Amino acid sequence: MSAKTVVEVAALRALMGLPAPVQRVLAGPPLRLDGQKLAVDLQLMLRIQQLTREPAIESLEVELGRQAAVRQTGLTAGRQRVGSVRDLNAGGLLARLYTPSSAHGPVETPGPLLLFLHGGGFFFGDLETHDASCRFIAERAGVRVLAVDYRLGPEHPFPAAHDDALAAYRWVLEHAAALGADPARIAVGGDSAGGNLAAHIAIEAARDGLPLAWQLLVYPATDVSGETESKRMFGKGLFLTQEFMDLAVASYTPDPATRTDPRVAPLRADLPAGLAPAYVVTAGFDPLRDEGEAYAAKLAAAGVEVETRRFPDQIHGFFNIVGAGRTSKAAVAVIADRVRTALHPAG
């Protein structure tokens, strides 16, 4: 980390750690939309980004944008404690295994494992952008987390990411013992594009009769070409922009005919019987809010055990903000606690 970045991290953390009344003075009048009020620490963060003229990653050349995404997520990541971290090869895909402190001891027994797919619009994101969140979830939930990289557009358009995600899940099943995983407590999760991939894995697992205990879908993309009120209301100035979404769609699905494929748009899929229980998380100020909640409703209508949790004061991307401010980390803590209860049912 450069000296400049160290200073930026310290400054941002200090500002986002100020008392809420002070933050309100700095952030300006409360932002209220659709009966919701944006968290003051997030409103302040967005104002700082505007004042410092932080470039939108969608405005950069793809490779530079990917580097900027790592840098920007690092500003709010913090130092997250976890028992151990190990990089490995998951059937040709780069992967990182996070083992919580609670899983270390003189006798290790197989425990739950969450296969995690990162977000980034299918063309940004990697193990680094989501490292802090995976550490946080693993340690607080007491579960092993296996984060897996997958091929990205535009170099590797649809269905590359979906094929890689499914291959990673099958690899986990085959190597459960080596990963310290209990095959009966393997779950899949992801945020945004990663939530889409997690939903795809769950659907294919049910179709093939393969074991899957649970699915965690954090503001999942479920209908990339669909029009919703949340896209209209929140597509500007709240981190995830309409310009980013348009670029993501063009990068991963350059052929418009693929944008309604049920793998890309699980909201349009025929759901099989036997789908794993789902926990669907949305953010109030997120363009993807409505399609995530619509997918939760679709799961429920199909008889799937589903729980939906909206964090009304949060924005898209809050899952990565675990090292600065208060409200986003508190929301991710709620998610981690739900992972724990789902995969440690007697704990």
Image (tube, rainbow, N blue to C red):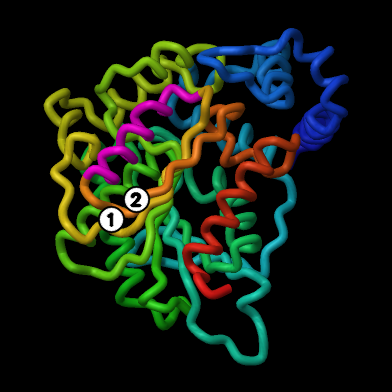
Magenta part of the chain:
286-301
> Residue placed at 24% from the left, 51% from the top?
303
- Image spot of residue 320 (x, y percent): 59, 40
Q: Quadrant of the C terminus?
A: bottom right
Tell me the residue that label 2 is attached to.
Answer: 198
The amino acid pointed to by label 1 is Ala
> Residue 124, can we see it?
yes
Q: Is residue 244 magenta?
A: no
- What element does badge 2 sit on? helix
Horizontally, residue 58 falls left or right of residue 226, namely right
Circles 1 and 2: CB atoms closer than 8 Å: yes
Tell me the residue that label 1 is attached to.
Answer: 202
In-front residue for pair 42/64 = 42
**As displayed, is residue 118 above or below residue 250?**
below
**As displayed, is residue 233 above or below residue 301?**
above
Horizontally, residue 36 falls left or right of residue 116, namely right
In-front residue for pair 205/242 = 205
